[in-house]
Amino acid sequence: MKLFFKKLSDDLTDLLRNEEDYNVLIEIGEASNCQLFKVHSVILNSRCSYFRNELSKINFDEKNIKKINKPHVSADAFKVIIDYIYGGFVRYEKVDASTIFDLLSTANQFGLNELVETSQTQLVKNHKSWIHLNFAKVYKTSLESDNFKVLQQSCNEIIVKQPSVLFDSENFTNISEKALITFLKLEAVHTDEVKIWEQIIRWGIAQNSGLGSNPDGWSDANFLTLKSTLKNCLPYIQYSQITTEDFTNKLCPYQQIFEPNLWKDIETKNKTIASTSQVTSATISSSKNTAITDENKNNDSTTLFQNNSTVTSKEKNEMENENSATSTIMSTTSIATSTTSTTTSATSYGSTSLPENDREYKPL
């Protein structure tokens, strides 16, 4: 069976190469760098529904030729595609990563699903370094079609472990809003939330050429412009993971881009975290002081026994019992303090806690 298929594949490939009896002329690329492919309508109609539809709209010219023009298609990628249409296979080992990437989008446009699957699999398995170097462009493309799930999954795994691959890419500010929101919805991204906030602001400013990088000199209209740009992104920031210091220094300068209710929720949550942090610190300090006092009492009692050789056995026992009672009281006090602290902490958070692994912001 394989032998029969190889013979058929070779014969059809030869037909493509010798251009005998062609009746379709496909122009690929811009006029200054256009390449011509002489092919056969019977093959295109049988192997590709996209070209079957295209040819049905075109009339033959005086030479009995139909012409198709595709200026935005890569010539290298199309050569792979036309070889696949005639011969039924692709020699990926002879195709570089950039061409495979172009091939993925073009094959999807032409409805060649088998080629779409194999192309993205080849990229993910054999060209990981190229994906890293061109990450923003690859990530953006992976979200353009549901047929690119393999590539999209690979990109998501990279982002979670190394978000800098996206942020540091020279094309980061060119990614789509959809790509940015998809990133914000990912769980357990390995970076501080304030860094994500900074990159969102950077992206938003880059979408509006009239905005400077320093909000101190912005007008109300400037803030309104950024607010409109980021309105679909802001609800997905995990504001509860941003420290009080970063809230003051990084978020407050952009207060005007938030809806009043959202800003009030963020501000309230931040104050709750700050208050809880202070209570926790005070409780820890109190516990340490109690332990030190208790230890000092024990040491003083021991020293007294050692230095007073005239103390009677009965007096010594009474002093030991008194010291034991004192320690018990101090221990009970420490436990009560700890219990109060736990209750305070639970009351402070209550139902206002945001889901730890969910980037979608919930009203407080």
Image (cartoon, rainbow, N blue to C red):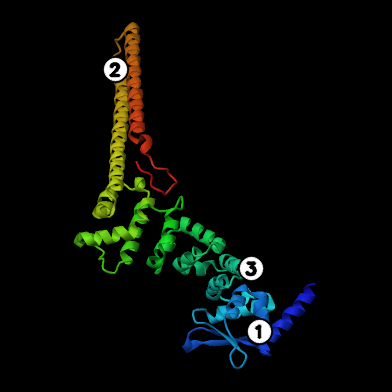
Q: Which residue is mark 3?
A: 114
The residue nearer to you, when weighing 168 against 306, is 168
The residue nearer to you, when weighing 268 against 305, is 268
Other-residue count near label 2 (Cα within 10 Å), few / some / many at <14 / 14–19 / ≥20: some
Dot 1 or dot 3: first in sequence order is 1
Q: Which residue is mark 1?
A: 40
Q: Is residue 270 above or below residue 219?
A: above
- Picture disc at residue 304: 2
Residue type at the position of mark 2: Leu
Residue type at the position of mark 3: Glu
- Picture disc at residue 253: none
The residue nearer to you, when weighing 170 against 24, is 24
Residue ID at (33%, 62%): 204
Question: Could you tell me if the residues under marks 1 and 2 are in contact, i.e. CB atoms within 8 Å?
Answer: no
Which mark is in front, 1 or 3?
Answer: 1
Is disc 3 placed on a helix, strand or loop?
helix
Dot 1 or dot 2: first in sequence order is 1
Looking at the rendered image, the quarter that the N terminus falls into is bottom right
Label 2 – label 3 distance at C-alpha: 90 Å
The answer to whether one can see residue 164 in this image is no
Is disc 2 placed on a helix, strand or loop?
helix
Residue ID at (62%, 76%): 52
Q: Which image quarter: residue 94?
A: bottom right
Q: Position of residue 216 (x, y in %)?
A: 20, 59
Q: Position of residue 64 (x, y in %)?
A: 62, 90
Question: Could you tell me if the residues under marks 2 and 3 are in contact, i.e. CB atoms within 8 Å?
Answer: no
